[in-house]
Image (spheres, rainbow, N blue to C red):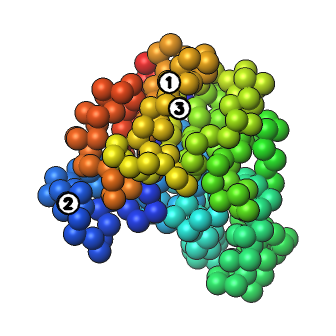
Amino acid sequence: MKITFLGTAAANAFPEAFCTCGNCEQARQLGGRSLRKRSSVLVNDDLLIDLGPDIMAASQLHGCPLVNVRYCLQTHPHADHLDLSHLLSRSPGFGVVGAPTLNFYASAETLTRAAETFQRDLAGYSLLSPEAEKELNLTIHTVEPLKPFLFGPYSVTAFPANHAPTMGALLYAVQSDGHTVFYGTDTATLPEETWRAFHQHESLFDVVIFDHTYGPDQPGSDHLSAHQVIDHVNRMRDEGLLRPNGRVFATHIAHEGNPVHPVLEEFAKDHGYEVAYDGLVLEKWS
């Protein structure tokens, strides 16, 4: 299994284009790995996690065409994770040739919000209608938390997030080729229900990707902070949820409290995890 990080920033990217804080100014000066687009990942070449606003730019910048994407797992409907205009732009009506049908997976709450937004802002029909499936080359699937499901070469389980409770936010464990990845953004401290479910589903992760919105000197609130990530990593190791050679990566990194990449990378290294960056490709699992 191959993972490509298309973006690793929180909602307003890093640097924030309108901001002159020290972190943003340093990121502009350094460039490279300190420049972050809004968070999304590509698994192999056919599974997208979050139809985010920056995936077009990411595809071009990192040389990873999305022409083979036929599955999308949507975490929740917030705009930094879901840009519904992509459903139109990838459709035959916009001149796209050869794109496979997109199987779009999300919670019932996320689909309801998405359907309302799509009909109000983008088209005169519901995203959940047969017309949408035809016009958009799309098949919608409703995901229920803690009920594993299969598609293509993947086995997936959705776990409840501690985030946007009325929107059905989900975290995903994706298994394929004997490896399992846990994609854990957006969320605050994981609910005990989710910790129990990890054990009920006999989870054993090769790679864990955690929300890291708030930095080393900030408390967590609606998202995880650096020290909460450390606590989560330690608990995963203590409870046997991470393989001995398993790796943990931070993503969804906000500019307010997180330093530029080299500084944050050193902090993370001292605390048992790594920091993802845009364009990072994981193919080796230890």
Tag on residue 232?
3
Q: Residue drawn 25% across and 49% down?
A: 260
Q: Is residue 141 above or below residue 190?
A: below
- Counting other residues with Cα less than 10 Å from the Cα at mark 2, is it few (<14), some (14-19), or many (20 or more)? some
Q: Residue drawn 72% across and 23% down?
A: 199
Q: Looking at this view, is 70 or 170 the one in front?
A: 170
Q: Which of marks 3 and 2 is nearer the N terminus?
A: 2
* Label 3: element kind: helix
Could one spot residue 203 in this view of the protein? yes
Q: Which of marks 1 and 2 is nearer the N terminus?
A: 2
* Label 2: element kind: helix
Taking 152 as reference, is 207 left or right? left
How many tags in the picture? Answer: 3
C-alpha separation, residue under disc 3 versus residue under disc 2: 28 Å
C-alpha separation, residue under disc 3 versus residue under disc 1: 5 Å
Q: Is residue 241 above or below residue 182?
A: above
Q: Residue drawn 66% across and 47% down?
A: 161
The residue that label 2 is drawn on is: 22
Query: Which amino acid, mark 3?
Result: His
Q: Residue drawn 55% across and 60% down?
A: 81
Query: Which amino acid, mark 1?
Result: Asn
Q: Looking at this view, is 62 or 256 the one in front?
A: 256
Q: Is residue 242 above or below residue 279?
A: above
Q: Position of residue 55 (x, y in %)?
A: 47, 59
Could one spot residue 156 in this view of the protein? no
* Image marks 3 and 1: residues in contact by CB distance under 8 Å: yes
Q: Where is residue 187 in the image (x, y as percent from the top left)?
A: 58, 48
The residue that label 1 is drawn on is: 234
- Counting other residues with Cα less than 10 Å from the Cα at mark 1, is it few (<14), some (14-19), or many (20 or more)? some
